[in-house]
Image: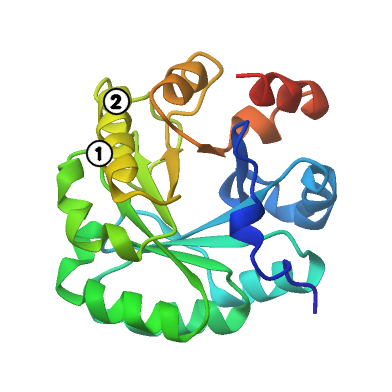
Amino acid sequence: MPHPAPGWIDRLPRSRLIAEYSMWSADLIRLADDLDRIAPHADILHVDVADGVFAPAFLFFPDLVARLRAATATPIHVHLMVADAVLLSQVAQFAEAGADLISLHVENAAVAAQALDLIQGLGVKGGMVLRVETPVASVLPWLDRLDMLTLLGTAIGVKGQGLDPSAPARLIEAAGLIKAAGRRILLAADGGIRDATVPLLRAAGAGTVVLGSLAFGAADLGARMRWLHGL
């Protein structure tokens, strides 16, 4: 079973944007073909999970992650958008399926400590995500336990929206908190990722962006990635 090598997160590039590919934007009928296409370019695979309650969408499931794990050693990041009542079971299932990094939401605060304990105990990297309306400072109680912090730039669980105007300022604030923490925590921007917005997000401190149609819809993916790496 392929897996990223130990210490993979510490070896992610520091001098360029990290490319995190959202499997929600892949062609689900030809998923294996899309996985092969992005293999030379993807630093991380991003798998959204939503229960239809915490977020309006309903997607994806552990069997999909298990099949991705069997096909690739690229790190898999699972973003859980689920209610508190099922969060711990979802963490366990996706860790067993092969996730390398699991992010819960700051809005899961009632069970966040338990979830982060479980993630750590299962040997998986941990992250947190903030809805666009959630104050950035609300992550402070958990920051020293995180490997990644993701800020949503659009309403949760809905594709194709424009970037919220507050997104760059929120990234700047988050980057300041990470700098004060004194260690590397990946700062990710998720939602509203377009050719006109990525330079703004990068300038505001994003170390990685979650790529959807910007990558999967590119006629020349190599050229698209050269542009991204040059920002």
Residue for badge 1: 132
The location of residue 221, given as percent across then percent down, is 78, 29
Q: Residue at x 43, y 29 (%)?
A: 192
Q: Is residue 115 above or below residue 131?
A: below
Q: Amino acid at mark 2?
A: Asp
Residue 134 appears in the rendering: no
In primary-sequence order, the first of circles 1 and 2 is 1
Circle 2: element type: loop
Image quarter (top left, top right, bottom left or bottom right) of the C terminus: top right
Give the residue number, with chain letter if any, for mark 2: 164
Question: Which quarter of the image is occupied by the N terminus?
Answer: bottom right
| Residue at the top extreme, as displayed | 196
67 left or right of 58? right
Identity, as a three-letter code, of the amino acid under mark 1: Val
| Side of 112 relative to 179 (left or right) | left
Query: Pointer 1 and pointer 2: residues touching (CB < 8 Å)?
Result: yes
State the residue lying farthest toward the front: 182
Identified at 14% across, 73% down, the residue is 110
